Image: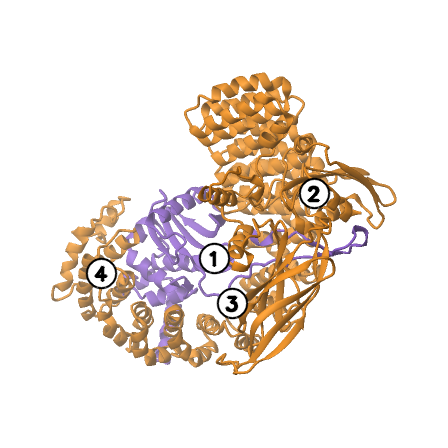
Amino acid sequence: MIKKFDKKDEESGSGSNPFQHLEKSAVLQEARIFNETPINPRRCLHILTKIIYLLNQGEHFGTTEATEAFFAMTRLFQSNDQTLRRMCYLTIKEMANISEDVIIVTSSLTKDMTGKEDVYRGPAIRALCRITDTTMLQAIERYMKQAIVDKVPSVSSSALVSSLHMVKMSYDVVKRWVNEAQEAASSDNIMVQYHALGLLYHLRKNDRLAVTKMLNKFTKSGLKSPFAYCMLIRIASKLLEETEGGHDSPLFDFIESCLRNKHEMVVYEAASAIVHMPNCTARELAPAVSVLQLFCSSPKAALRYAAVRTLNKVAMKHPSAVTACNLDLENLITDSNRSIATLAITTLLKTGSESSVDRLMKQISSFVSEISDEFKVVVVQAISALCQKYPRKHSVMMNFLSNMLRDDGGFEYKRAIVDCIISIIEENPESKETGLAHLCEFIEDCEHTVLATKILHLLGKEGPRTPSPSKYIRFIFNRVVLESEAVRAAAVSALAKFGAQNDDLLPSVLVLMQRCMMDSDDEVRDRATFYMNVLQQKQKALNAAYIFNGLSVSVPGLEKSLHQYTLEPSEKPFDMKTVPLATAVITEQKTEIAPVATSKLPEKLAPSRQDIYQEQLAAIPEFQGLGPLFKSSEPVQLTEAETEYVVRCIKHTFSNHMVFQFDCTNTLNDQLLQKVVVQMEPSEAYEVARYVPAPSLPYSQPGSCYSLVRLPDDDPTAVSCTFSCTMKYLVRDCDPNTGEPDDDGYDDEYVLEDLEVTVADHIQKVLKPNFGAAWEEVGDEFEKEETFALSSVRTLEEAVSNIVSFLGMQPCERSDKVPENKNSHVLFLAGVFRGGHDVLLRARLALADGVTMQVTVRSSEETAVDVILASVG
Amino acid sequence: DEEYQDVPNVITWQAGKMDSLVLVKRSIRVRFYVAEPTLYTVKAVLILDNDGERLYAKYYDDTYPTVKEQKAFEKNIFNKTHRTDSEIALLEGLTVVYKSNIDLYFYVIGSSHENELMLMSVLNCLFDSLSQMLRKNVERRALLENMEGLFLAVDEIVDGGVILESDPQQVVYRVALRGDDVPLTEQTVSQVLQSAKEQIKWSLLR
């Protein structure tokens, strides 16, 4: 046996780990001496230590061997050696889940928890609760109650914390100990007070009134424990959030008063709570910011870190509130803790002026390689934000980003940089070529398929429209030669776009395509063959439809329609117009840089919200034969908040009908509503064809009723209509406690707010990545043009956002963003009109006294053009 | 940080002709993160040696459920911290407070929303308790010779993720290593006074 605690060994000076080569089987063999009499405490202690060490290293113990060792260990309770006994408790806790029949030590532990040795009592309680279930807990309930109010702090704390662990499993038993916990909360010992408060909160957290009372009590009487204060601050701020209480509430006063606590821990907790509160005004933030400012010069790194991290959060919402701390933050730039330095810089980037940007960027680049990926992402986010704030600085930023792109780093970091560069390109046309060049360089050696395909897609979209598109071809074709299938396929699609846009490049692109047609992968070959054939036709319309803009249908919807078609074969060819359109969030035209998601890779194609509605509506027999669902609106509230009944409406548009889905909730616990319908009175020639009632609306269980409306056939341009809505139903009063309704009921009604149907309900957004090509493709057969004066609108931005939201069409080519200091602008919008016809709109806007707008609309069908012009004018 | 996403204004229009429209701006309430009031503060306590090998590791929740994930995390943590002496870092979305001494690296890990000073109090308590128990020889060898003391000390400081005790004197007292392990001559005067005080206190309470 190795005597690792031998004095001689200590002097030999070997740095080896005495536990290093422990064999589980050998240790378990040794454990047999537990059965020897008399017990040798020292040796047994060493063996228990080894067992726990092995468990701690992650060694796996089988049930049989663990149980065997556990049973042998129980014999050691005969020894009175203190350390050995304590190690037995630990072994019990460690083995509670791997050994069988651990409950056999219950009586030994119960004896120790109620015995005279205080050193045993606390740990014995913790070990006991580890092996106890709800039934056994009741058996020891009496002891637990006594232990909670025990005078010895370690006993009381152990009992309170163990009770807290037991709450998950045996809430009903533990909640009976509330009075004892209450008594423990007034203990003089700081830890006991903390644990008691924590247990009380967990037992009462679902009862807001009880929590409020508890808060009142403790905020008045005050506490000794800084830990308990922190807990109290968290409870208070959670309650403030839930009740949406104003900041004049006594709870806010309490949190603010904690800023003057003598413990830094409490002061920081209070400051952090205030900073995290929604809708804080600058005045309310000020005291919190000034304590954080003080912490910035603390000698403790953790405190400086906490302070600057919290200030960084303040700076995101209220940069001006942090400006006062700029000097302190500047001092932290050279902090030896790189995390602190980074946070200081990114905070300064948010609060600083344009002139300080260059200096700060230089400072970051001096140590960016030393910080963790998490903070690099933080730096990139700060740069992203900065680019939006100071677009003129884009060249400095772009340089910096391209250097970062060359450094080592994980996927999240690289993705953050790529996203940032892409958004700079989109915001600043003059940065496009440099940005694309950096990205080309990056994909030459990029291990992340997702990023490579994303960049190739961007190159295909932007590259052909740059002054010298040919220089990108090499980079793209290199991918076809060197990369994995997914990247090769993306490269082929990008190549095709160059061929379609640039006639002089077409012959070369065709040669390269030819080469791609011999690829070993099916998808790559298929794409190449397809593009080859389209390109050889040399037709603008074909290029626009199949190369630039692609399909805009919902993929799950297409799958379903095709399946349906194969089930019922017919002479008629399959009609793409019957497939529902994709409504997934269109990300390409985002005006804001999305914060870098910390989540995983792009998730699988989930059915969109509209696909789900389509399914739900198809299940209702009354709505058979309406055809594919064209569009579902966002929910519209038809009641004020906190009324007796809450009703919201979702408008579903079909080719010749609309279905109004009313989601109703009954908030009265003494009523059961039955046969609920929403009666609708249209202002125009709309005809309500059918009501589908919600059979029953019990208290707080949402239910839906529907109205089916036929759209006017004779006047297809009548797209807007106002409906007055009344909810009608049968009320049966019922017992609020049991929910048992009376036998008789009476009819009643409830007036809802009016519901509007507008032109946007008839148009679905569709993104045309290449608007020009789409414009040519539709052609001018049904083109109409008209000029309007928008007298009430003062700026171009306002005009653009008005038009976009009014028509519900998709802005293309980032034309929803109006460059600064311009007095004219062109807006491009694309959509599909009900029935499946593309509609494109070009609006030239000029700013004079008001805004003058010349609108040109094109569509493959005349009605759509008329509808749009009629509704704008 | 996800809790501070900017929420765009939702613009709703009332129907009718464009010029007469009224712009209704409504900002969505952002769900701000409020730290859930809980006593579960500590996610893990680790002690690594100067090769980054695990000497002690106790994980209190399922952030890293398998031994493989735990070891990978420990490797990452060690690589990011062993060359710097900077006390605190954000790693894999978690707040890590740490301290090194000679050939030992102590880590206490909590959620990134946790009060950093609370985590610090756990780290300090662990270090100071061991320092007393090992008679200031906080180094790998001495620690390995007193592993049972370490096991018992951590058990007194954190229970299932809840901070049980933050005062090193109390921890050392409760671990109650046999008297012969700590000869009186090697105790500092203040320690003797403290333990005498404690003993008197307990005898009074009994």
Confirm whether circles 4 and 2 share one chain: yes
Q: Nearer the viewer, residue A347 or A87?
A: A347
Q: On the rendered structure, is A701 left or right of B148?
A: right
Question: In this view, which residue lies farthest toward the left?
Answer: A37
Q: Quadrant of residue A72?
A: bottom left
Tell us which disc is closer to us: 4 or 3: 3
User: Which residue is denoted by mark 3 in the rendering?
Assistant: A231
| Crowd class of label 4 (few under 14; some 14 to 19; many from 20; radius 10 Å) | many
Q: Amino acid at mark 4?
A: Leu
Q: On the rendered structure, is A92 left or right of A828?
A: left
Rendered shade, chain B: purple
User: Which residue is denoted by mark 4 in the rendering?
Assistant: A45
Q: Quadrant of residue B150?
A: bottom left
- The residue tagged with tag 1: helix, strand or loop? helix
Q: On the rendered structure, is A452 left or right of A103?
A: right
Tell us which disc is closer to us: 1 or 3: 3
Q: Nearer the viewer, residue B124 or A516?
A: A516
Rendered shade, chain A: orange
| Residue A583 place in picture, x, y as percent | 58, 46
Sooner in the amino-acid sequence: mark 4 or mark 2 = 4
Q: How far is the residue under mark 1 from the one under mark 4? A: 31 Å
Q: On the rendered structure, is A870 left or right of B89?
A: right
Q: How far is the residue under mark 4 from the one under mark 3? A: 39 Å
User: Which residue is denoted by mark 2 in the rendering?
Assistant: A389
| Crowd class of label 3 (few under 14; some 14 to 19; many from 20; radius 10 Å) | many
Q: How far is the residue under mark 1 from the one under mark 3? A: 16 Å
